[in-house]
Amino acid sequence: MSAKTITRFAPSPTGWIHVGNLRTALMNYLIARKAGGEFILRIDDTDPNRSKEEYVDGIKRDLDWLGLHWDRVERQSSRLEKYEAAAQQLRDMDRFYEAFETPTELDLKRKKQLNMGKPPVYDRAALSLDEAEKEALRAERGDGVWRFKLLQERIVWNDGILGDVSIDGASVSDPVLIRGDGQILYTLASVVDDTEMGVTHVVRGSDHVTNTGTQIQIMQALGGEVPQFAHHSLLTGPQGEALSKRLGTLALKDLRAQGIAPQALLSLMSRLGSSDPVELRTDMQTLIDGFDISRFGSAPTKFDAEDLKPLTARYLQTLSLAEVADAVRAAGVPDAQATRFWDVTRENVTTLHDLAGWWAMFSEGAEPVIDDEDRDFVAEALELLPQAPFDDNTWGNWTAAVKEKTGRKGKALFMPLRKALTGQQHGPDMSQVMPLLQVVKARGSA
Ligand code: GLU
């Protein structure tokens, strides 16, 4: 066995990848990088009807955005002969058989077994068909499916997350590896690839545990080295509710469009479900160094997309103007104002999308908020406010004058003025806001 650690992320390009896929991708990526090994992006596209190029592109774009760079790409659709060869090998060793039951027949068998209190495992009726019977069935129904004949013994492995796992081979149906229409299924393709590509570690979701049992037997039949498996728990919503139906709304491309920072996603997903705390990590090497799969537990992991916002906000606070210059410019801020604008807003934005709102407020003025009991006070104060442009001293000078004239002080002085000028109760330091503020809508309206 080669000493080099090789992992792979193996999405099927049948949809946009989401946070659940990211968990898988990230763990495999971090394991490879930590060991100085190799990370393969494997596109599982043996299903020509459901696989789409736009999803392949989407997967690459998402991984690029996150900085999860792969060492090479493999595509199952260009490796079909290898799977055929493996299928033939299984036939030759009598571990592969053709079966002709229709889905309805299989369903009926399952129901009968369940009624009798038996596990719904395929009864291997096809094994007793002779050649003439198979010919007749083929003529009537077309080619059958090909099933792998499992050894009915316990399949055990030491899982990187679940610990010792044991599956009774007799409790699992012989898996179909080739469909009636000749399509090779993922179960076989994946075994061939993992073996040939020398994959040493496979991390994937716990929905694959039974698959792993059968794949270990197929690997052993084909003489392949069995990798180290680890199955992470599935994500649930914040209340523990199933997330599977909502994952469609948690596509990485949508989170990107919402302005979530990749650093926020990586920080959360590399720790969520482990005994390590979630902390903002802005560089990949720190994530790599701190990653330890044995710290992840098998319990379902609660995921709340809202958690990505404070992490994104915290990340943005670490950025210099140079790092956000494009976004600041895109928000309409003139270069001459950019430094002050970023100083004022960096602690007051959740995502960079918020910049445009801030700039609109400064350049067009905010809708004033004036409580009834402050109406006269604000009107009096605004008479003392000089015309824009304002400068660094405007707020201090103005509020001192207002205090002098009205006798108000502290919160009763500052809060109504802040609300009248910005429409908000909280926000950046007003002496910093004033030089950016070009229009005071409250003027004249009181
Ligand atoms: N294409 C499979 C999936 O997306 C890959 C599973 C695996 O990692 O083996 O579920």
Image (tube, helix red, strand yellow):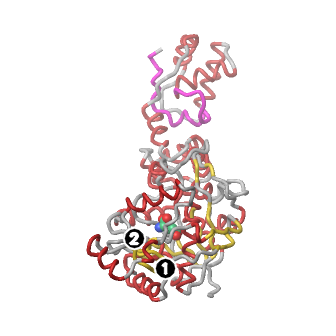
Residue at point 48% right, 76% down? 148
Number of numbered labels in the structure image: 2
For residue 45, the mark is 2
Residue 131 locus on image (x, y percent): 35, 83
Viewer can see residue 182: yes
Residue 258 locus on image (x, y percent): 47, 47
**Contact? badges 2 and 1 (CB < 8 Å):** no
Residue 401 locus on image (x, y percent): 62, 20
Q: Does 96 appear above or below 111?
A: below
The quarter of the rendered structure image containing the N terminus is bottom right
Residue at point 58% right, 66% down? 171
Whichever of labels 2 and 1 marks the residue nearer the N terminus, that label is 2
Q: Which residue is labeled 1 in the image?
A: 193
Q: Secondary structure at mark 1?
A: helix
Q: Could you classify mark 2 by the number of other residues whose Cα lies within 10 Å: few (under 14), some (14-19), or many (20 or more)?
A: many
- Tell me how far mark 2 sits from mark 1, CA to CA: 13 Å
* Residue 431 sits inside the magenta stretch: yes
Q: Secondary structure at mark 2?
A: loop
What's under tag 1, amino acid-wise?
Asp
Q: In terms of depth relative to the viewer, which is nearer, 7 or 371?
A: 7
Determine whether, in the image, residue 131 is placed left or right of residue 200.
left
Q: Does 342 appear above or below 48?
A: above
The magenta segment is: 423-445
What's under tag 2, amino acid-wise?
Asp
Q: Does 280 appear above or below 208?
A: above
